[in-house]
């Protein structure tokens, strides 16, 4: 019911506007190559629509060959952009082979007068490329399940509309047209393409913004030196009244760390901090969390208190760290660490209460000679690695 020329104009303007939008986004974030590649791809698709409009008025074979080369090229660039979005940079060479096959076959068919067959082949390649784009996004659906599912469905719908165009020509036996195809399937295809491509431009922008926001949040909650979570992450993870009997907190403080910095230099001190963080990671179970609170202070949240596991884990961390050889310009350095343990309660202690109790126990470990663990006032010495029972 809509004027065919108006539909073509709407498709061209939609592609151009979306391309300009992506180009502006890329100019502000030059590292996001996806937006540049997608922008060029959309311009090529818009050029295909303009060439198609020209062909409807002047069905010259060279114009037909041009428009058939532009469509798979535009979709191929969108496919490459999808690969860039997820780091699949090797996809370009495979796409180039598909585009070359499409362009060569449609150009040959157009020049020998089988323009109807050429349109069928063009629509077949467009369908394949669109399904391929949807598959690239679908493989990464764990990142944004709802958005990527919607995007995949839209690509599938758009691919089906191109397949439908080719199917109508095939069923009608339109091997030779002598003009641009104009039927109900073509009009449905233009409407679907305008709607889908607009949405498919907006959804990656949304995913990119969500990804940037998640990265910024992760950076805000991560200690840049050790890669452990920081104090802010600890506070965010455990709201008030969070620590029941099944949880425990172990606080660690590196012994004589200031003297280490003074004697060996701050770069050696940084290496000591990173080495201790690595030792903590080695002893993490599923559900446990390690944090750097600041300076030389660290914390370990034990998710399941079972038997003597908490004390044994703390002592093993102390023993493993004490056995680390840290090579510096001055010589080999060995360090120790002290630990204080606090257990949760039936009344569900707050994070502040747990840290205060663990810090008090840690202070007792320091006063008792360092390189040891204090658990509820009982002082132990890490003379050997105890067996874990959990």
Image (cartoon, rainbow, N blue to C red):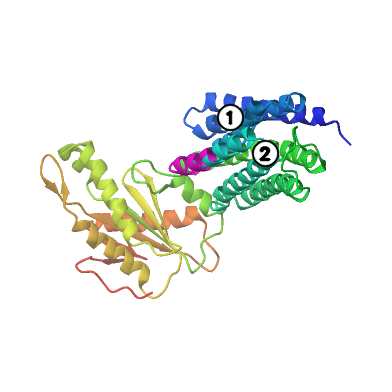
Is mark 1 in CB contact (under 8 Å) with mark 2? no
Taking the image as shown, residue 131 lies to the left or right of residue 282, namely right
The residue under label 1 is 39
Which SS class for mark 1?
helix
Nearer the observer, disc 1 or disc 2?
2
Tell me residue 91's x, y (percent).
Answer: 47, 43
Name the image quarter holding residue 189.
top right
Return the x and y of residue 16 as percentages of the image width and height.
67, 26
Q: How many marks?
A: 2
Q: Decide: is 341 above or below 72.
A: below
Residue at 78% over, 43% down: 185
Image quarter of residue 10: top right
Mark 1–mark 2 Cα distance, whole angstroms, equals 32 Å
The numbered disc on residue 229 is none
Tag 2, which secondary structure? loop
The answer to whether one can see residue 212 in this image is no
| Quarter of the rendering containing residue 72 | top right
Please provide the residue range marked out in magenta.
85-100
Q: Quadrant of the C terminus?
A: bottom left
Q: Quadrant of the N terminus?
A: top right
Prevalent SS, magenta region? helix
Tell which circle, 1 or 2, labels the residue nearer the N-terminal end: 1
Residue 15 appears in the rendering: yes
* Residue 195 higher or lower than 335, as above or below: above
Characterize the local packing of mark 1: few (<14), some (14-19) or many (20 or more) Cα atoms within 10 angstroms.
many
Residue that mark 2 sits on: 114
Image coordinates for residue 79, horizontal then vertical, percent: 55, 41
Residue 248 lies in the magenta stretch: no
Residue at 26% across / 41% down in the picture?
270
């Amino acid at each position: 019911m809509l004027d065919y020329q108006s539909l073509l104009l709407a498709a061209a303007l939609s592609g151009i506007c979306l391309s300009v939008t992506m180009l502006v986004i890329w100019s502000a974030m030059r590292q996001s190559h996806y937006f540049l590649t997608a922008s060029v791809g959309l311009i090529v698709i818009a050029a295909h629509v303009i060439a198609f409009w020209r062909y409807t008025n002047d069905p010259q074979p060279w114009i037909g060959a041009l428009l058939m080369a532009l469509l798979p090229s535009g979709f191929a660039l969108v496919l490459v952009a999808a690969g860039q979005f997820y780091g699949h940079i090797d996809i370009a060479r495979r796409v180039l082979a598909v585009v070359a096959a499409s362009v060569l076959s449609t150009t040959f068919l157009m020049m020998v007068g089988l323009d109807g067959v050429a349109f069928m082949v063009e629509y077949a390649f467009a369908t394949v490329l669109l399904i391929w784009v949807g598959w690239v996004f679908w493989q990464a659906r764990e990142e944004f399940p709802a958005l990527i599912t919607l995007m995949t469905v839209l690509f599938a719908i758009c691919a089906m509309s191109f397949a439908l165009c080719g199917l109508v020509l095939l069923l009608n036996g339109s091997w030779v047209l002598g003009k641009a195809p104009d039927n109900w399937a073509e009009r449905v295809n233009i409407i679907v393409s305008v709607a889908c491509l607009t949405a498919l431009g907006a959804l990656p922008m949304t995913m990119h913004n969500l990804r940037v926001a998640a990265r910024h949040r992760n950076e805000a909650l991560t200690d840049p030196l050790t890669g452990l979570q920081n104090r802010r992450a600890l506070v965010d993870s455990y709201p008030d009244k969070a620590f029941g009997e099944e949880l425990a907190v172990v606080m660690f403080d590196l012994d004589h760390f200031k003297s280490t910095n003074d004697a060996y230099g701050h770069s050696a001190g940084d290496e000591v901090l990173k080495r201790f963080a690595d030792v903590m990671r080695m002893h993490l179970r599923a559900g446990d969390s390690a944090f750097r609170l600041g300076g030389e202070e660290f914390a370990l949240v034990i998710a399941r208190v079972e038997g003597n596991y908490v004390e044994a884990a703390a002592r093993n961390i102390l023993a493993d760290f004490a056995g680390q050889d840290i090579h510096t310009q001055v010589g080999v350095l060995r360090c120790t660490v002290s630990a204080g343990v606090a257990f949760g309660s039936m009344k569900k202690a707050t994070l502040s209460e747990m840290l205060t109790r663990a810090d008090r126990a840690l202070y007792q470990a320091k006063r008792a000679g360092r390189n040891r663990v204090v658990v509820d006032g009982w002082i132990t010495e890490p003379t050997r690695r105890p067996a874990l029972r959990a």
